Image: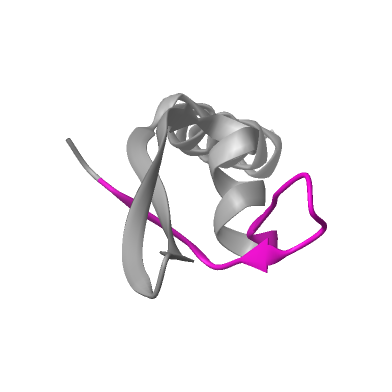
């Protein structure tokens, strides 16, 4: 019974950590060359799965160009 209680408690703790992470939000941007000048393009505040996806996969614009995204706490 103690093992079951410990397993359930650990599972709930890990679930709560994951839930907090999904609520985390950051300001995101990427850098793009415009008329020979590197320009920062703001993507705004992103949270949870959208934040993780942008950081992992970058941003693809309408031209099909893929950019590395940088996200920072605000």
Q: How is the image coloured?
A: one colour
Q: Is residue 55 left or right of residue 28?
A: right
Q: Residue furthest bottom?
A: 36
68 shown above or below 73: below
Question: For this rendering, which residue is in front, 44 or 51?
Answer: 44
Q: Is residue 74 left or right of residue 70?
A: left
Question: For this rendering, which residue is in front, 11 or 19?
Answer: 19
- Rendering coords of residue 27 (x, y %): 32, 37
- Rendering coords of residue 72 (x, y %): 27, 50
Picture quadrant of residue 63? bottom right
Residue at 47%, 31% in the rendered image: 46
Residue at 70%, 65% in the rendered image: 66
Q: Residue furthest left?
A: 74
Question: For this rendering, which residue is in front, 42 or 11?
Answer: 42
Q: Is residue 49 left or right of residue 26?
A: right
Residue at 65%, 42% in the rendered image: 7
Please report the bounds of the magenta region as a residue range. 57-72
Which corner quadrant holds the C terminus?
top left
Which corner quadrant holds the N terminus?
top right
Question: For this rendering, which residue is in front, 54 or 60?
Answer: 60
Q: Is residue 63 magenta?
A: yes
- Rendering coords of residue 49 (x, y %): 64, 36
- Rendering coords of residue 73 (x, y %): 22, 43
Count of numbered badges drawn on the protein? 0
């Amino acid at each position: 019974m103690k093992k079951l209680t410990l397993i359930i408690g650990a599972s709930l703790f890990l679930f709560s950590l994951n839930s907090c992470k999904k609520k985390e939000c950051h300001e995101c941007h990427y850098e793009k060359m415009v008329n020979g000048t590197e320009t920062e393009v703001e993507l705004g505040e992103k949270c949870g799965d959208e934040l993780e996806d942008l950081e992992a996969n970058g941003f693809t614009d309408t031209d099909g160009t893929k950019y590395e995204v940088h996200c920072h706490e605000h």
